[in-house]
Image (cartoon, helix red, strand yellow):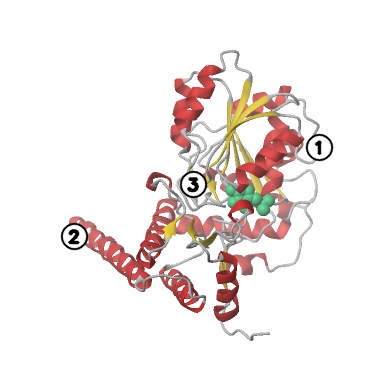
Amino acid sequence: MTIHTGRHFLQIPGPTNVPDRVLRAMDRPVIDHRGQEFAQLGAEVLEGVKSIFKTKGPVVIYPASGSGAWEAAIVNTLSPGDRVLMFETGHFSNLWRDIAVRHGLVVDYVPGNWRRGAQPEDAEHRLKEDKQHAIKAVMVVHNETSTGVASRIAEIRKSMDRAQHPALLMVDTISSLGSMDYRHEEWGVDVTVGGSQKGLMLPPGLSFNAISEKALAANKSAKMGRYYWDWQEMLKPNRSGFFPYTPATNLLWGLREALAMLHEEGLDNVFRRHDRHAKATRAAVEAWGLEVWCEDPKEYSSSLTAVAMPLGHDADKLREIILDAFDMSLGTGLAKLGGKVFRIGHLGHFNDLMLAGTLSGVEMGLRLAKVPHKPGGINAALEHLAASHQRAATGAQVAEAALR
Ligand SMILES: *Cc1c(COP(=O)(O)O)cnc(C)c1O
Protein backbone atom coordinates (compact mmCIF):
# COMPACT_ATOMS: atom_id res chain seq x y z
CA MET A 1 0.00 0.00 0.00
CA THR A 2 1.21 3.49 -0.84
CA ILE A 3 1.62 5.74 2.18
CA HIS A 4 0.16 9.17 1.53
CA THR A 5 1.02 12.35 3.40
CA GLY A 6 -0.94 15.58 3.68
CA ARG A 7 -4.65 15.78 3.00
CA HIS A 8 -6.60 13.56 0.66
CA PHE A 9 -8.09 15.50 -2.28
CA LEU A 10 -11.78 14.57 -2.37
CA GLN A 11 -12.69 15.97 -5.78
CA ILE A 12 -15.73 13.87 -6.53
CA PRO A 13 -18.94 15.84 -7.06
CA GLY A 14 -20.24 14.85 -3.66
CA PRO A 15 -19.72 14.05 -0.90
CA THR A 16 -17.51 17.14 -0.85
CA ASN A 17 -14.84 18.46 1.50
CA VAL A 18 -16.30 19.32 4.90
CA PRO A 19 -14.83 22.53 6.38
CA ASP A 20 -13.06 22.20 9.74
CA ARG A 21 -15.55 24.69 11.17
CA VAL A 22 -18.40 22.32 10.35
CA LEU A 23 -16.52 19.30 11.72
CA ARG A 24 -15.83 21.19 14.96
CA ALA A 25 -19.46 22.29 15.20
CA MET A 26 -20.58 18.65 15.09
CA ASP A 27 -17.95 17.44 17.53
CA ARG A 28 -20.05 17.61 20.68
CA PRO A 29 -22.08 15.34 22.92
CA VAL A 30 -25.42 14.21 21.57
CA ILE A 31 -28.27 16.02 23.29
CA ASP A 32 -31.85 15.03 24.17
CA HIS A 33 -33.89 15.57 21.02
CA ARG A 34 -37.01 16.13 23.15
CA GLY A 35 -35.41 18.86 25.25
CA GLN A 36 -35.42 22.65 25.02
CA GLU A 37 -31.82 22.96 23.80
CA PHE A 38 -32.72 20.83 20.80
CA ALA A 39 -35.92 22.76 20.13
CA GLN A 40 -33.84 25.94 19.74
CA LEU A 41 -31.43 24.26 17.34
CA GLY A 42 -34.29 22.70 15.37
CA ALA A 43 -36.17 25.98 15.08
CA GLU A 44 -33.02 27.80 14.02
CA VAL A 45 -32.02 25.42 11.22
CA LEU A 46 -35.59 24.88 9.97
CA GLU A 47 -35.91 28.66 9.58
CA GLY A 48 -32.33 29.27 8.41
CA VAL A 49 -32.29 26.69 5.64
CA LYS A 50 -35.17 28.48 3.86
CA SER A 51 -32.77 31.23 2.79
CA ILE A 52 -30.69 28.72 0.83
CA PHE A 53 -33.72 27.51 -1.14
CA LYS A 54 -34.92 31.12 -1.43
CA THR A 55 -38.34 30.40 -0.03
CA LYS A 56 -40.50 31.64 2.81
CA GLY A 57 -42.47 28.39 2.86
CA PRO A 58 -41.70 25.25 4.86
CA VAL A 59 -38.61 23.11 4.31
CA VAL A 60 -38.61 19.66 5.92
CA ILE A 61 -35.32 18.05 6.89
CA TYR A 62 -35.04 14.26 6.74
CA PRO A 63 -32.35 12.15 8.38
CA ALA A 64 -31.74 10.46 5.02
CA SER A 65 -29.60 10.55 1.89
CA GLY A 66 -30.87 12.52 -1.09
CA SER A 67 -32.74 9.49 -2.45
CA GLY A 68 -35.08 9.68 0.54
CA ALA A 69 -36.07 13.23 -0.34
CA TRP A 70 -36.67 12.10 -3.95
CA GLU A 71 -39.12 9.51 -2.68
CA ALA A 72 -40.67 11.99 -0.25
CA ALA A 73 -41.44 14.45 -3.07
CA ILE A 74 -43.35 11.70 -4.89
CA VAL A 75 -45.29 10.05 -2.07
CA ASN A 76 -46.41 13.36 -0.59
CA THR A 77 -47.93 14.84 -3.74
CA LEU A 78 -49.12 12.05 -6.05
CA SER A 79 -51.35 8.99 -6.27
CA PRO A 80 -50.66 5.63 -7.93
CA GLY A 81 -51.56 5.77 -11.63
CA ASP A 82 -50.85 9.53 -11.95
CA ARG A 83 -48.93 10.63 -15.03
CA VAL A 84 -45.73 12.63 -14.67
CA LEU A 85 -43.39 14.23 -17.20
CA MET A 86 -39.67 13.61 -16.73
CA PHE A 87 -36.55 14.22 -18.83
CA GLU A 88 -33.68 11.84 -19.46
CA THR A 89 -30.64 13.91 -18.56
CA GLY A 90 -28.44 11.11 -17.18
CA HIS A 91 -27.99 8.58 -14.42
CA PHE A 92 -29.73 10.64 -11.74
CA SER A 93 -32.84 11.35 -13.82
CA ASN A 94 -32.96 7.60 -14.52
CA LEU A 95 -32.88 6.80 -10.80
CA TRP A 96 -35.62 9.31 -9.97
CA ARG A 97 -37.69 7.87 -12.83
CA ASP A 98 -37.20 4.38 -11.37
CA ILE A 99 -38.52 5.54 -7.99
CA ALA A 100 -41.57 7.04 -9.74
CA VAL A 101 -42.24 3.80 -11.63
CA ARG A 102 -41.93 1.69 -8.47
CA HIS A 103 -44.61 3.85 -6.91
CA GLY A 104 -47.03 3.15 -9.73
CA LEU A 105 -46.68 6.44 -11.60
CA VAL A 106 -46.96 6.49 -15.38
CA VAL A 107 -43.84 8.31 -16.54
CA ASP A 108 -43.67 10.20 -19.84
CA TYR A 109 -39.89 10.14 -20.16
CA VAL A 110 -38.49 12.55 -22.75
CA PRO A 111 -35.41 10.81 -24.17
CA GLY A 112 -32.04 12.55 -24.06
CA ASN A 113 -28.44 11.94 -25.14
CA TRP A 114 -26.94 12.59 -21.66
CA ARG A 115 -25.07 15.63 -23.01
CA ARG A 116 -27.91 18.13 -22.83
CA GLY A 117 -30.38 19.27 -20.21
CA ALA A 118 -34.17 19.18 -20.16
CA GLN A 119 -35.36 21.41 -23.02
CA PRO A 120 -38.03 23.98 -22.16
CA GLU A 121 -39.53 23.59 -25.68
CA ASP A 122 -40.03 19.86 -25.09
CA ALA A 123 -41.83 20.58 -21.82
CA GLU A 124 -44.05 23.18 -23.51
CA HIS A 125 -44.88 20.87 -26.42
CA ARG A 126 -45.75 17.88 -24.21
CA LEU A 127 -47.84 19.97 -21.85
CA LYS A 128 -49.78 21.69 -24.67
CA GLU A 129 -50.64 18.24 -26.04
CA ASP A 130 -52.02 17.21 -22.65
CA LYS A 131 -55.36 19.00 -22.98
CA GLN A 132 -57.00 16.87 -20.26
CA HIS A 133 -54.29 17.83 -17.75
CA ALA A 134 -53.53 14.18 -17.03
CA ILE A 135 -49.91 15.10 -16.24
CA LYS A 136 -49.78 15.87 -12.53
CA ALA A 137 -46.11 16.79 -12.17
CA VAL A 138 -43.09 17.87 -14.20
CA MET A 139 -39.93 16.50 -12.58
CA VAL A 140 -36.48 17.80 -13.50
CA VAL A 141 -32.95 17.27 -12.24
CA HIS A 142 -31.44 20.77 -12.07
CA ASN A 143 -27.78 19.78 -12.10
CA GLU A 144 -27.25 16.31 -13.61
CA THR A 145 -24.26 15.15 -11.59
CA SER A 146 -23.46 12.25 -13.92
CA THR A 147 -22.84 14.55 -16.90
CA GLY A 148 -22.08 18.07 -15.64
CA VAL A 149 -25.11 19.50 -17.44
CA ALA A 150 -27.48 21.99 -15.79
CA SER A 151 -31.08 22.37 -16.94
CA ARG A 152 -32.60 25.86 -17.08
CA ILE A 153 -35.31 25.66 -14.44
CA ALA A 154 -36.57 29.26 -14.78
CA GLU A 155 -37.16 28.66 -18.51
CA ILE A 156 -38.90 25.36 -17.87
CA ARG A 157 -41.21 27.19 -15.47
CA LYS A 158 -41.97 29.75 -18.20
CA SER A 159 -42.72 26.99 -20.69
CA MET A 160 -45.22 25.48 -18.22
CA ASP A 161 -46.84 28.88 -17.84
CA ARG A 162 -47.03 29.35 -21.61
CA ALA A 163 -48.78 25.98 -21.85
CA GLN A 164 -51.10 27.13 -19.03
CA HIS A 165 -50.69 23.72 -17.47
CA PRO A 166 -51.43 23.18 -13.77
CA ALA A 167 -48.89 20.37 -13.16
CA LEU A 168 -46.63 20.63 -10.13
CA LEU A 169 -42.96 21.41 -10.80
CA MET A 170 -40.55 19.27 -8.78
CA VAL A 171 -36.80 19.84 -9.01
CA ASP A 172 -33.78 17.89 -7.77
CA THR A 173 -31.12 20.40 -6.65
CA ILE A 174 -28.99 17.92 -4.71
CA SER A 175 -25.76 18.91 -6.48
CA SER A 176 -26.60 22.56 -7.16
CA LEU A 177 -28.09 23.85 -3.91
CA GLY A 178 -25.64 26.26 -2.28
CA SER A 179 -23.34 26.23 -5.31
CA MET A 180 -25.45 27.41 -8.26
CA ASP A 181 -28.16 30.06 -8.48
CA TYR A 182 -31.47 28.54 -7.43
CA ARG A 183 -34.78 30.21 -6.49
CA HIS A 184 -37.56 27.97 -5.25
CA GLU A 185 -40.17 30.69 -4.86
CA GLU A 186 -39.32 33.04 -7.71
CA TRP A 187 -39.14 30.15 -10.20
CA GLY A 188 -42.46 28.76 -9.02
CA VAL A 189 -41.09 25.39 -7.98
CA ASP A 190 -43.49 23.26 -5.92
CA VAL A 191 -41.10 20.74 -4.41
CA THR A 192 -37.35 21.21 -4.30
CA VAL A 193 -35.25 18.19 -3.34
CA GLY A 194 -31.90 18.88 -1.67
CA GLY A 195 -29.12 16.94 0.04
CA SER A 196 -26.47 17.78 2.63
CA GLN A 197 -23.27 16.34 1.16
CA LYS A 198 -22.64 18.52 -1.88
CA GLY A 199 -22.87 22.33 -2.00
CA LEU A 200 -23.96 22.48 1.63
CA MET A 201 -20.52 21.19 2.73
CA LEU A 202 -21.90 18.66 5.23
CA PRO A 203 -21.35 14.94 5.55
CA PRO A 204 -24.01 12.72 3.91
CA GLY A 205 -27.13 12.06 5.95
CA LEU A 206 -29.57 14.98 5.62
CA SER A 207 -31.96 15.71 2.80
CA PHE A 208 -34.64 18.30 2.21
CA ASN A 209 -38.00 19.05 0.64
CA ALA A 210 -38.88 22.72 0.15
CA ILE A 211 -42.64 22.84 -0.27
CA SER A 212 -44.93 25.36 -2.01
CA GLU A 213 -48.53 26.07 -1.02
CA LYS A 214 -49.70 24.30 -4.14
CA ALA A 215 -47.71 21.20 -3.16
CA LEU A 216 -49.24 21.34 0.32
CA ALA A 217 -52.68 21.43 -1.26
CA ALA A 218 -51.78 18.42 -3.47
CA ASN A 219 -50.58 16.65 -0.33
CA LYS A 220 -54.13 16.66 1.04
CA SER A 221 -55.45 14.45 -1.76
CA ALA A 222 -52.28 12.44 -2.57
CA LYS A 223 -53.06 8.77 -1.99
CA MET A 224 -49.64 7.16 -1.89
CA GLY A 225 -48.84 5.32 1.31
CA ARG A 226 -46.39 7.16 3.55
CA TYR A 227 -45.30 7.36 7.12
CA TYR A 228 -41.60 8.17 7.47
CA TRP A 229 -41.75 10.72 4.64
CA ASP A 230 -45.13 12.23 5.55
CA TRP A 231 -44.88 16.04 5.46
CA GLN A 232 -47.80 16.45 7.87
CA GLU A 233 -46.09 14.24 10.47
CA MET A 234 -43.02 16.47 10.13
CA LEU A 235 -44.65 19.90 9.92
CA LYS A 236 -46.61 19.51 13.16
CA PRO A 237 -43.67 19.03 15.56
CA ASN A 238 -41.43 21.26 13.37
CA ARG A 239 -43.57 24.24 14.43
CA SER A 240 -41.92 24.07 17.84
CA GLY A 241 -38.50 22.97 16.56
CA PHE A 242 -39.03 19.23 17.09
CA PHE A 243 -39.08 16.17 14.83
CA PRO A 244 -41.53 13.24 14.82
CA TYR A 245 -38.66 10.76 15.22
CA THR A 246 -35.01 10.97 16.21
CA PRO A 247 -33.35 13.60 14.01
CA ALA A 248 -29.68 13.52 12.97
CA THR A 249 -28.84 15.82 15.88
CA ASN A 250 -25.15 16.38 15.23
CA LEU A 251 -25.61 16.91 11.51
CA LEU A 252 -28.01 19.69 12.43
CA TRP A 253 -25.27 21.43 14.44
CA GLY A 254 -23.17 21.10 11.30
CA LEU A 255 -25.98 22.53 9.18
CA ARG A 256 -26.21 25.54 11.48
CA GLU A 257 -22.50 26.23 10.95
CA ALA A 258 -22.65 25.63 7.19
CA LEU A 259 -25.55 28.08 6.87
CA ALA A 260 -23.52 30.67 8.79
CA MET A 261 -20.55 30.15 6.46
CA LEU A 262 -22.65 30.48 3.30
CA HIS A 263 -24.16 33.74 4.57
CA GLU A 264 -20.82 35.16 5.72
CA GLU A 265 -19.52 34.73 2.19
CA GLY A 266 -22.85 35.79 0.66
CA LEU A 267 -24.77 33.43 -1.64
CA ASP A 268 -24.05 35.49 -4.75
CA ASN A 269 -20.33 35.35 -4.00
CA VAL A 270 -20.61 31.59 -3.44
CA PHE A 271 -22.19 31.22 -6.88
CA ARG A 272 -19.57 33.49 -8.50
CA ARG A 273 -16.79 31.44 -6.92
CA HIS A 274 -18.24 28.24 -8.37
CA ASP A 275 -18.68 29.86 -11.79
CA ARG A 276 -15.03 30.99 -11.77
CA HIS A 277 -13.74 27.56 -10.80
CA ALA A 278 -15.87 25.89 -13.44
CA LYS A 279 -14.58 28.29 -16.11
CA ALA A 280 -10.98 27.74 -15.08
CA THR A 281 -11.52 23.98 -15.20
CA ARG A 282 -12.99 24.15 -18.69
CA ALA A 283 -10.05 26.33 -19.78
CA ALA A 284 -7.71 23.56 -18.61
CA VAL A 285 -9.71 20.82 -20.33
CA GLU A 286 -9.74 22.75 -23.60
CA ALA A 287 -6.01 23.47 -23.42
CA TRP A 288 -5.33 19.75 -22.86
CA GLY A 289 -7.21 19.17 -26.11
CA LEU A 290 -9.83 17.10 -24.29
CA GLU A 291 -13.56 17.54 -24.52
CA VAL A 292 -15.99 18.88 -21.94
CA TRP A 293 -18.86 16.36 -21.95
CA CYS A 294 -21.63 19.01 -21.78
CA GLU A 295 -22.59 20.01 -25.33
CA ASP A 296 -24.23 23.38 -24.79
CA PRO A 297 -22.36 26.27 -23.11
CA LYS A 298 -25.73 27.55 -21.81
CA GLU A 299 -25.95 24.37 -19.76
CA TYR A 300 -22.47 24.15 -18.26
CA SER A 301 -22.56 23.07 -14.63
CA SER A 302 -20.66 25.20 -12.14
CA SER A 303 -20.37 22.43 -9.54
CA LEU A 304 -18.62 19.81 -11.63
CA THR A 305 -17.04 19.21 -15.02
CA ALA A 306 -17.33 15.85 -16.77
CA VAL A 307 -14.45 15.24 -19.19
CA ALA A 308 -14.68 12.86 -22.17
CA MET A 309 -11.79 10.40 -22.45
CA PRO A 310 -10.10 10.04 -25.83
CA LEU A 311 -11.27 6.85 -27.58
CA GLY A 312 -9.37 3.75 -26.51
CA HIS A 313 -8.49 5.15 -23.06
CA ASP A 314 -10.23 4.13 -19.87
CA ALA A 315 -11.29 6.91 -17.49
CA ASP A 316 -11.29 4.54 -14.52
CA LYS A 317 -7.70 3.51 -15.20
CA LEU A 318 -6.75 7.20 -15.16
CA ARG A 319 -8.65 7.73 -11.91
CA GLU A 320 -6.93 4.74 -10.35
CA ILE A 321 -3.48 6.06 -11.30
CA ILE A 322 -4.31 9.51 -9.93
CA LEU A 323 -5.63 8.06 -6.67
CA ASP A 324 -2.57 5.91 -6.22
CA ALA A 325 0.03 8.52 -7.18
CA PHE A 326 -1.52 11.71 -5.83
CA ASP A 327 -4.15 10.62 -3.32
CA MET A 328 -6.93 12.36 -5.18
CA SER A 329 -10.41 10.96 -5.81
CA LEU A 330 -12.18 11.99 -9.00
CA GLY A 331 -15.75 11.06 -9.96
CA THR A 332 -16.26 7.89 -11.97
CA GLY A 333 -18.37 7.63 -15.12
CA LEU A 334 -21.81 6.42 -14.01
CA ALA A 335 -23.88 3.72 -15.72
CA LYS A 336 -23.39 3.91 -19.50
CA LEU A 337 -20.67 6.55 -19.10
CA GLY A 338 -18.49 4.06 -17.19
CA GLY A 339 -14.88 4.35 -18.43
CA LYS A 340 -15.91 7.06 -20.91
CA VAL A 341 -15.81 10.13 -18.68
CA PHE A 342 -14.26 11.24 -15.44
CA ARG A 343 -15.75 14.00 -13.33
CA ILE A 344 -13.96 16.81 -11.54
CA GLY A 345 -15.96 18.09 -8.57
CA HIS A 346 -15.29 21.78 -7.83
CA LEU A 347 -18.14 22.50 -5.46
CA GLY A 348 -18.56 23.18 -1.80
CA HIS A 349 -15.68 24.16 0.48
CA PHE A 350 -13.11 24.97 -2.19
CA ASN A 351 -10.67 27.68 -3.27
CA ASP A 352 -8.29 28.69 -6.05
CA LEU A 353 -5.29 26.77 -4.76
CA MET A 354 -7.34 23.64 -4.16
CA LEU A 355 -8.49 23.88 -7.77
CA ALA A 356 -4.91 24.43 -8.95
CA GLY A 357 -3.86 21.33 -7.00
CA THR A 358 -6.76 19.32 -8.40
CA LEU A 359 -6.01 20.23 -12.00
CA SER A 360 -2.29 19.58 -11.44
CA GLY A 361 -3.18 16.08 -10.28
CA VAL A 362 -5.27 15.54 -13.40
CA GLU A 363 -2.52 16.81 -15.72
CA MET A 364 0.17 14.66 -14.09
CA GLY A 365 -2.23 11.72 -14.20
CA LEU A 366 -2.82 12.20 -17.92
CA ARG A 367 0.92 12.04 -18.38
CA LEU A 368 1.39 8.93 -16.20
CA ALA A 369 -1.53 7.16 -17.88
CA LYS A 370 -0.16 8.11 -21.32
CA VAL A 371 -3.43 9.71 -22.34
CA PRO A 372 -2.78 11.87 -25.41
CA HIS A 373 -3.09 15.52 -24.43
CA LYS A 374 -1.39 18.85 -24.91
CA PRO A 375 0.50 20.52 -22.06
CA GLY A 376 -0.64 23.91 -20.80
CA GLY A 377 -3.93 23.10 -19.12
CA ILE A 378 -2.68 24.31 -15.75
CA ASN A 379 -1.43 27.57 -17.24
CA ALA A 380 -4.75 28.19 -18.91
CA ALA A 381 -6.55 27.62 -15.62
CA LEU A 382 -4.15 29.83 -13.62
CA GLU A 383 -4.48 32.56 -16.26
CA HIS A 384 -8.21 32.51 -15.81
CA LEU A 385 -8.05 32.45 -12.01
CA ALA A 386 -5.54 35.31 -11.83
CA ALA A 387 -7.27 37.43 -14.47
CA SER A 388 -10.69 37.05 -12.86
CA HIS A 389 -9.15 37.90 -9.50
CA GLN A 390 -7.58 41.00 -10.95
CA ARG A 391 -10.92 42.07 -12.39
CA ALA A 392 -12.56 41.52 -9.00
CA ALA A 393 -9.77 43.47 -7.24
CA THR A 394 -10.02 46.32 -9.73
CA GLY A 395 -13.78 46.33 -9.30
CA ALA A 396 -13.37 46.61 -5.53
CA GLN A 397 -10.92 49.51 -5.93
CA VAL A 398 -13.34 51.28 -8.22
CA ALA A 399 -16.13 50.79 -5.70
CA GLU A 400 -13.89 52.03 -2.89
CA ALA A 401 -12.84 55.09 -4.88
CA ALA A 402 -16.48 55.86 -5.53
CA LEU A 403 -17.13 55.75 -1.79
CA ARG A 404 -14.31 58.19 -1.01
C1 LIG B 1 -25.98 12.81 -5.28
C2 LIG B 1 -27.24 12.99 -6.05
C3 LIG B 1 -28.40 12.23 -5.78
C4 LIG B 1 -28.43 11.08 -4.83
O1 LIG B 1 -28.27 11.44 -3.54
P1 LIG B 1 -27.93 10.34 -2.43
O2 LIG B 1 -27.58 11.18 -1.26
O3 LIG B 1 -26.79 9.52 -2.96
O4 LIG B 1 -29.15 9.52 -2.22
C5 LIG B 1 -29.54 12.53 -6.49
N1 LIG B 1 -29.57 13.48 -7.43
C6 LIG B 1 -28.48 14.20 -7.74
C7 LIG B 1 -28.56 15.24 -8.81
C8 LIG B 1 -27.29 13.97 -7.07
O5 LIG B 1 -26.19 14.68 -7.38
**Crowd rating for badge 1 (residues with CA inside 10 Å; few <14, some 14–19, many 20+):** few
CA gap, disc 2 and disc 1: 59 Å
Where does label 3 land, which residue? 115
Residue type beneath disc 1: Tyr
Q: Nearer the viewer, mark 2 or mark 1?
A: 1
Q: Residue lying furthest front in this view?
A: 312
Placement of 117 over or under 7, stated as above or below: above
Q: Secondary structure at mark 3?
A: loop
17 sits to left or right of 221: left
Where does label 2 land, which residue? 401
Residue type beneath disc 2: Ala
What residue is shown at x 64% (from left), y 45% (from top)?
A: 208
Q: Is mark 2 within 8 Å of ligand 1?
A: no
Q: Position of residue 27 (x, y in %)?
A: 68, 69
Placement of 356 over or under 88, stated as above or below: below
* Residue nearer the viewer, 66 or 338: 338
Q: Is residue 241 visible?
A: no
Q: Which mark is residue 227?
A: 1
